[in-house]
Amino acid sequence: MELAVTAGWYMTLAAILFGIGALGILIRRNALVMFMCIELMLNAVNLTFIAAGRALGKLDGQLAVFFVLVVAAAEVVVGLAIIVAIFRRRQSASVDELAEMRG
Amino acid sequence: MGDWRLAAGDRRLPMVELVVFALMAVASVLGALTVIRARNPVYAAMGLLATLFAMGVLYVLQLAHFVDAVQIIVYAGAVMTLFLFVIMLVGVDKQEDTSESIPHQRRLALALGLVAVGVTAALVARGRFSWIPVVSVPADPQATNGTIEAIAEPLFTNWVLAFEATALLLTIAAAGTIALASFRRPAAVPPSKVT
């Protein structure tokens, strides 16, 4: 019986995690939790990169993950600063209350 | 360099990879579900931490050693600490409003998610991964052994422009964060103290 873990398994797991993250963005309205869901989705994509890179026999997948990590770190820093700035102004982290720009 | 071929690189141990993969898959999915289900944001952060560590183990299973180290240090260490700081700052005891502003929002979101997972499962089950020539066994396990020297060589040759661009990006992000943090409403601070 051959039951090797192929790249498809990793990609399926990554797809499930990405789906959970997208679901969290749709149903939660705490800005911090939505941010964590974005991190979850980024990590799912990283897993796909690494699995694809290994299946193709190339290191480029891991390098792409490295850059995704750097960009995600910058994004978290700026995003959390914005959340804190909004919270200082309105004492709330709920995205439903940020409706000034509604048309 | 050759001593790092545990489990994943050694094709004689597929069972080990299967068991570790199954454990870490369950752990990461449970952590992800905690992120979207926990009422308390601190629990959500802990769930995300569990997922990040499980992903780290999966990275090692895929021979991405350096990426795993960066994942643990940067993500599980720095980013999650920052998250917890901000959660404490914003307040952990605030109950989230669970009413639905859009009718049937949760049910629709759940249906969409199930459809997405179903489509993915169908794709995998029918083997539509033709854009990957070799799916079962990697061509050369040593070619994707992500040690520091193996990562550094292309990073500072082919990818050096992207590397410099991310350095610039990080500098700009840090400067922007400091600008955001030092911003005060004019009413809150007397004009004489604004610098």
Image (cartoon, coloured by chain):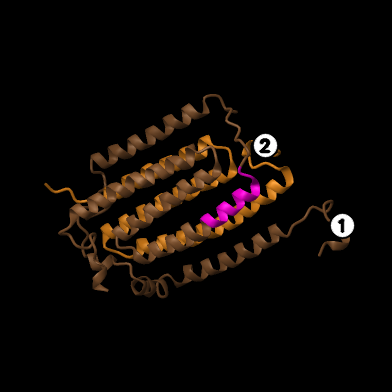
Chain colours: A orange, B brown
Q: Chain of mark 1?
A: B
Disc 1 crowd, CA 10 A, few/some/many (<14, 14-19, 20+):
few
The residue singled out by tag 2 in the image is A97
The residue singled out by tag 1 in the image is B190
Q: Is residue B100 above or below residue B1?
A: above
Which numbered tag is attached to residue B46?
A: none
At x 33%, y 40%, the residue is: B120
Please state which of residues B106 and B14 is positioned toward the viewer in this rendering.
B14
Cα–Cα gap, marks 1 and 2: 29 Å
Q: Which residues make up the magenta segment?
A: B80-92
- The image position of residue B63, as x and y in percent, is 30, 63
- The image position of residue B106, as x and y in percent, is 50, 29
Say what secondary structure mark 2 lies in: helix
Question: Does the magenta portion include A15?
Answer: no
Please state which of residues B119 and B43 is positioned toward the viewer in this rendering.
B43
Residue B112: image quadrant is top left
Question: Does the magenta portion include B88?
Answer: yes
Say what secondary structure mark 1 lies in: loop
At x 26%, y 57%, the residue is: A55
* Kind of residue at badge 2: Glu
Q: Chain of mark 2?
A: A
* Kind of residue at badge 1: Pro
